[in-house]
């Protein structure tokens, strides 16, 4: 491996970031597709990427998951999981944070589970990855509320598939902790509030309305709706509300 090889890897990384930024502004899917192609070319010979190999793997996972959100091509998630899995046990390096890798890997596995009719194994894996993240990460990290929220979402998704009380209780616990952690930081997110409302609603229905969960679910979901600052966020929250009646 030469310095030139690493320079090319660094260039591919920076180009992928630029293409993602342009996608955020213009919403042209071709920008994400070109970003993925650029990164995958760099990983065709991982040894040549040197210190940038983990970073390229992490970023290709991010890009492929983003493309999947548009195309719903499950094959992209399979590739993303395969590329990111080798990075999970990396120690901290100058280029990639292992917590970021765990979080992204969990998001990919959860998306795989949600897109599959037979989701038991990937759903268990998603819960396991996010639980490890919550247990290992410093609670003072800025992203810690997102880790809690993701673990709650994974438990809620597994409850939707299996109907086990332990999962819905865990979903309420971790979603509630996510909202509390955001409040400690002085900012709530629409997603965390809506997810907490959804978890409370699921448990309230399970208990046939014999608790205050349903009333609380409506209150938190209305808070999420009031906080929503984009049409897509409002549409998502309203969809939750409409599904309840």
Image (spheres, rainbow, N blue to C red):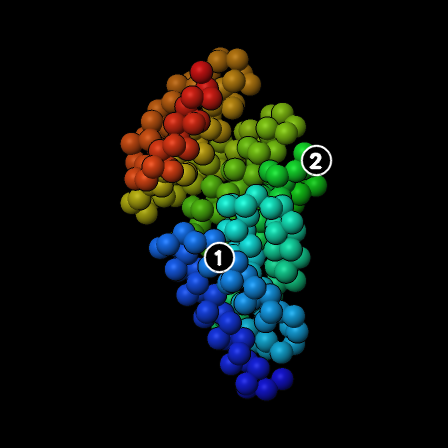
Question: In this image, 115 relative to 31: left or right?
Answer: right
> How far is the residue under mark 1 from the one under mark 2?
31 Å
The image shows residue 81 at horizontal and vertical percentages of 63, 54
Q: Residues within 10 Å of mark 2 (few under 14, many from 20)?
A: few
What residue is at 35 percent from the left and 55 percent from the top? 25
Residue 79, placed above or below residue 72: below
Q: Is residue 82 left or right of residue 61?
A: right
Picture quarter containing residue 127? top right
Q: Which residue is mark 2?
A: 118
Q: Is residue 228 placed above or below 46 in the rendered structure?
A: above
Q: Quadrant of the C terminus?
A: top left
Q: Under tag 2, what secondary structure?
A: loop
- 140, above or below 222, in the image: below
Q: Local crowd at mark 1 within 10 Å, few (<14), some, or many (≥20)?
A: few
Give the mark toward the camera: 1 or 2.
Answer: 1
Residue drawn at x 56%, y 66% is 39
**Residue 92 seen from this side:** no
Q: In the structure shown, which secondary structural element does the residue marked by tag 1 occupy?
A: helix
Question: Which residue is at the front of the view, 158 or 50?
Answer: 50
Q: Quadrant of the N terminus?
A: bottom right
Query: Which quadrant of the view contains residue 229?
Result: top left
Q: Residue at x 52, y 51 (%)?
A: 67
**Which of the two labelled residues, at mark 1 and mark 2, occupies the earlier sequence position?**
1
Percent of width and height locating residue 40: 60, 65
Q: How many marks?
A: 2
Height in image: 210 above or below 195? above
Which residue is the site of mark 1?
A: 30
């Amino acid at each position: 491996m030469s310095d030139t090889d690493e320079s090319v890897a660094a260039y591919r990384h920076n180009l992928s970031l630029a293409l993602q930024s342009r996608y955020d502004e213009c919403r042209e899917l071709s920008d994400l597709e070109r970003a993925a192609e650029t990164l995958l070319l760099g990983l065709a010979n991982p040894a040549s990427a040197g210190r940038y190999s983990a970073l390229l793997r992490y970023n290709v996972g991010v890009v492929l998951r983003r493309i999947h959100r548009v195309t719903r091509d499950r094959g992209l998630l399979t590739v993303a999981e395969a590329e990111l899995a080798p990075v999970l046990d990396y120690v901290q390096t100058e280029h990639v944070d292992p917590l970021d890798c765990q979080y992204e890997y969990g998001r990919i596995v959860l998306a795989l589970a949600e897109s599959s009719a037979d989701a038991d194994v990937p759903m268990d894996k998603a819960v396991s990855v996010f639980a490890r993240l919550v247990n290992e990460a410093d609670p003072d990290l800025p992203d810690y509320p997102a880790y809690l929220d993701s673990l709650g979402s994974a438990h809620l998704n597994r409850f939707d598939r299996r109907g086990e009380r332990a999962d819905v209780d865990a979903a309420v616990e971790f979603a509630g902790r996510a909202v509390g952690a955001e409040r400690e930081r002085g900012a709530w997110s629409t997603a965390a509030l809506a997810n907490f409302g959804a978890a409370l609603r699921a448990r309230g229905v399970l208990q046939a309305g014999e608790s205050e969960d349903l009333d609380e679910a409506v209150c938190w979901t209305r808070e999420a709706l009031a906080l929503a600052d984009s049409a897509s966020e409002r549409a998502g929250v309203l969809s939750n509300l409409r599904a309840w009646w």
